[in-house]
Image (tube, rainbow, N blue to C red):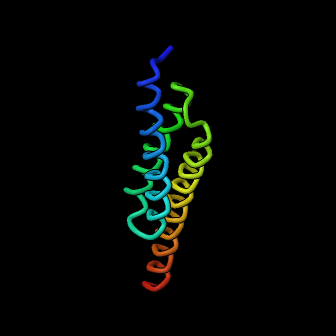
Amino acid sequence: MFSPQTREFYAGQIRKDSVKALVLSLVGFVCCPPVLAYFAWNTAQEVIMNIDLYQVEEGRKGLAQAAKILAIASIIFWVFGVIVRILFLVADSR
């Protein structure tokens, strides 16, 4: 369906972007979770879509899925942290 050159190009993109998504999601736990998690999730979603479309680098699909899970987890922890901080502020004001 796709030429070998096209498949090789997207294989390189998948290799690069799967690592980028994982790094963004890991850094998102420490620094600016909403922004980095958003970019990590989008990058991982694009990697998964390219793997399914071009059928190359299928071993990287797990890496991209892990990046998506970590991005979602960092958003959940961030929201939980914001709620806890608000509750502490409300409790201190009484």
| 18 with respect to 69 (left or right) | left
Q: Nearer the viewer, residue 4 or 63?
A: 4
- Provide residue 49's location: percent of width, then percent of height: 51, 32
| Residue 59 vertical position relative to residue 40 in the rendered view, above or below | above
Residue extending furthest front?
4
- Provide residue 8's location: percent of width, then percent of height: 45, 31
| Residue 52 vertical position relative to residue 15 in the rendered view, above or below | above
Which residue is drawn at the image coordinates 45% and 70% (left, top)? 30
Residue 55, picture quadrant: top right
Q: Nearer the viewer, residue 6 or 31?
A: 6
| Residue 49 vertical position relative to residue 34 in the rendered view, above or below | above
Which residue is drawn at the image coordinates 56% and 56% (left, top)? 70
Which residue is drawn at the image coordinates 56% and 37% (left, top)? 57
| Count of numbered labels shown in the rendering | 0
Which residue is drawn at the image coordinates 44% and 79% (left, top)? 89
| 61 with respect to 75 (left or right) | right
| Residue 44 vertical position relative to residue 75 in the rendered view, above or below | above
- Provide residue 91's location: percent of width, then percent of height: 50, 82
Q: Nearer the viewer, residue 77 or 49?
A: 49
